[in-house]
């Protein structure tokens, strides 16, 4: 494993190296199956704080298992990256720190360029120079930019034809839903603007890249409605998988209800607020001993403030599956989202019955209300079903068993990622 930290010094990149790169890639495709694959990430993927990091690392693990050599080029938001963990997957690691001051400047500049502000926020001249140097040294065969934020770097170097965009979700869909959750004021105006810019950029990217990856057919269908002139044969679904527990715990705490998800993510913050203010009080009236565990990294002050004797805000936990495995049930009342929610698959893989909203249930076609999950949208109905699962052991065991068997049968990472790297 090789680690390289770029300190901002000048890097020279000969224009002829691009010609060499193209020729080298051609030879690799003609004479060998294994490739050198370069991942571009806006955040260092370890510690594995959220679903985005979990997914990109699982993609890397799958590609590694197929015999490919992996190179990670990442922006960094904190001083010391978790290199030991990352080196278990990636063969060589390059990183440079994001400059917070220039991030906001690039945000503003992107508005005038008619590009998403978040692409500007994660744009770094140091990263661009580092990536050029990596291409010159490593000569990757394939590039995987993680989410739209990293696509501009690929476009600058004209590497579209040798890139797979890990779009994951239709962001414009999430922003359209988020607008309604923002009330009024300046923040809502920003969301309207970013929604317009992301929608425009998504259409642009779909036209320019040979392969776009999403996690649900619902998001593919949504993107196909944006513009009748954009191609649709380059949109592929590689859903999330899950590592199911080998043995589901036989005992559980009938008072323990959990919600899992990264807490710096708006849809999760909205869901937690919804649970604490509208759902959990109804449950407490009928099950006074019930406790709610909000399990997820980076909880902001407004989420930390929800903690009380019966509401536990854990922050990051080292072993998520172990922490939630003895829960009676998992709540996922998501009202703003797109794509498949990892929280649902992870909970089911731990043998927990899941009560979720129809918005995210649509992304998992195997879900059946009352058979392997409980699907409700009204706060009172959600609370009623939670109480029913707490008080009815036979019902809980049936939903738990069927949900666990469903993810084991249909949602292994190997199955869902098969053929990912084929252009």
Image (tube, helix red, strand yellow):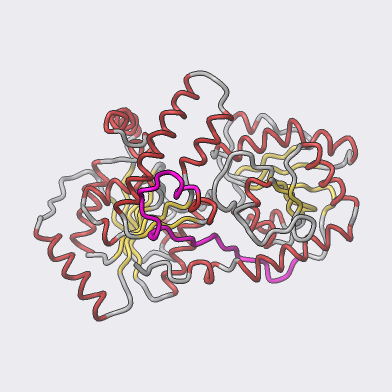
* Image coordinates for residue 79, horizontal then vertical, percent: 39, 43
Which residue is found at the position 74% from the left and 30% from the top?
277
* Image coordinates for residue 49, horizontal then vertical, percent: 53, 49
Which residue is found at the position 22% from the left and 69% from the top?
25
* Image coordinates for residue 160, horizontal then vertical, percent: 27, 56
Q: Which quadrant holds residue 323?
A: bottom right
Examine the rendered structure and indicate whether residue 299 appears above or below residue 165: above
* Image coordinates for residue 66, horizontal then vertical, percent: 42, 75
Examine the rendered structure and indicate whether residue 305 appears above or below residue 124: above
Examine the rendered structure and indicate whether residue 141 appears above or below residue 333: below
Q: Residue furthest bottom?
A: 31
On the rendered image, what quadrant is the C terminus found in? bottom left
Q: Residue furthest front?
A: 228
Q: Nearer the viewer, residue 94 or 156?
A: 156
Residue 239 falls inside the magenta stretch:
yes
**Which span is picked out in magenta?**
222-248
* Main secondary-structure element of the magenta-colored stretch: loop
Residue 120 falls inside the magenta stretch:
no
On the rendered image, what quadrant is the N terminus found in? bottom left
Which residue is found at the position 26% from the left and 65% from the top?
140
Q: Could you tell whether 404 is left or right of 384 in the image?
A: left
Q: Could you tell whether 323 is left or right of 384 in the image?
A: left
């Amino acid at each position: 494993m090789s680690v390289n930290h770029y300190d901002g010094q000048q890097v020279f990149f000969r224009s002829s190296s691009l010609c060499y790169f193209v020729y080298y890639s051609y030879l690799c495709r003609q004479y060998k199956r294994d490739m050198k694959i370069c991942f571009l990430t806006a955040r260092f993927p370890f510690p594995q704080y959220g679903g985005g990091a979990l997914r990109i690392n699982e993609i890397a693990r799958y590609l590694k298992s197929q015999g490919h050599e992996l190179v990670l080029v990442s922006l960094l938001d904190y001083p010391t990256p978790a290199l030991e963990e990352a080196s278990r997957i990636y063969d060589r690691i390059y990183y440079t720190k994001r400059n917070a001051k220039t991030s906001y400047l690039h945000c503003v500049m992107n508005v005038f360029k008619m590009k998403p502000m978040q692409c500007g926020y994660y744009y770094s001249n140091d990263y661009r120079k580092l990536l050029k140097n990596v291409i010159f040294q490593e000569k990757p065969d394939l590039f995987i930019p993680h989410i739209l934020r990293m696509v501009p770097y690929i476009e600058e170097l004209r590497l579209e034809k040798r890139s797979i965009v890990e779009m994951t979700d239709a962001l414009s869909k999430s922003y359209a839903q988020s607008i309604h959750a923002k009330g009024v004021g300046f923040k809502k105006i920003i969301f309207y603007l970013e929604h317009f810019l992301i929608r425009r950029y998504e259409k642009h990217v779909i036209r320019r890249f040979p392969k776009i990856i999403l996690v649900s057919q619902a998001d593919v269908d949504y993107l196909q409605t944006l513009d009748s002139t954009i191609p649709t044969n380059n949109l592929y679904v590689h859903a999330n998988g899950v590592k199911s527990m080998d043995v589901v715990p036989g005992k559980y705490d009938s008072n323990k209800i959990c919600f899992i998800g990264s807490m710096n993510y708006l849809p999760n913050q909205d869901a937690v607020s919804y649970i604490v203010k509208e759902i959990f009080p109804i449950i407490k009236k009928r099950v006074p001993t019930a406790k709610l565990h909000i399990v997820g990294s980076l909880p902001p002050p407004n989420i930390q403030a929800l903690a009380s004797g019966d509401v536990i805000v854990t922050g990051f936990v080292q072993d998520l599956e172990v922490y939630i495995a003895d829960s009676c049930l998992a709540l996922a009342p998501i009202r703003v989202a797109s794509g498949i929610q990892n929280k649902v698959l992870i909970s089911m893989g731990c043998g927990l019955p899941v009560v979720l909203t129809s918005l995210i249930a649509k992304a998992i076609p195997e879900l059946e209300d009352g058979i392997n999950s409980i699907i409700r949208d009204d706060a009172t109905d959600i609370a009623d079903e939670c109480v029913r699962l707490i008080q009815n052991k036979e019902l809980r065991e049936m939903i738990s068993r069927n949900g666990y068997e469903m993810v084991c049968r249909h949602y292994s990472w190997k199955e869902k990622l098969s053929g990912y790297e084929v252009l």
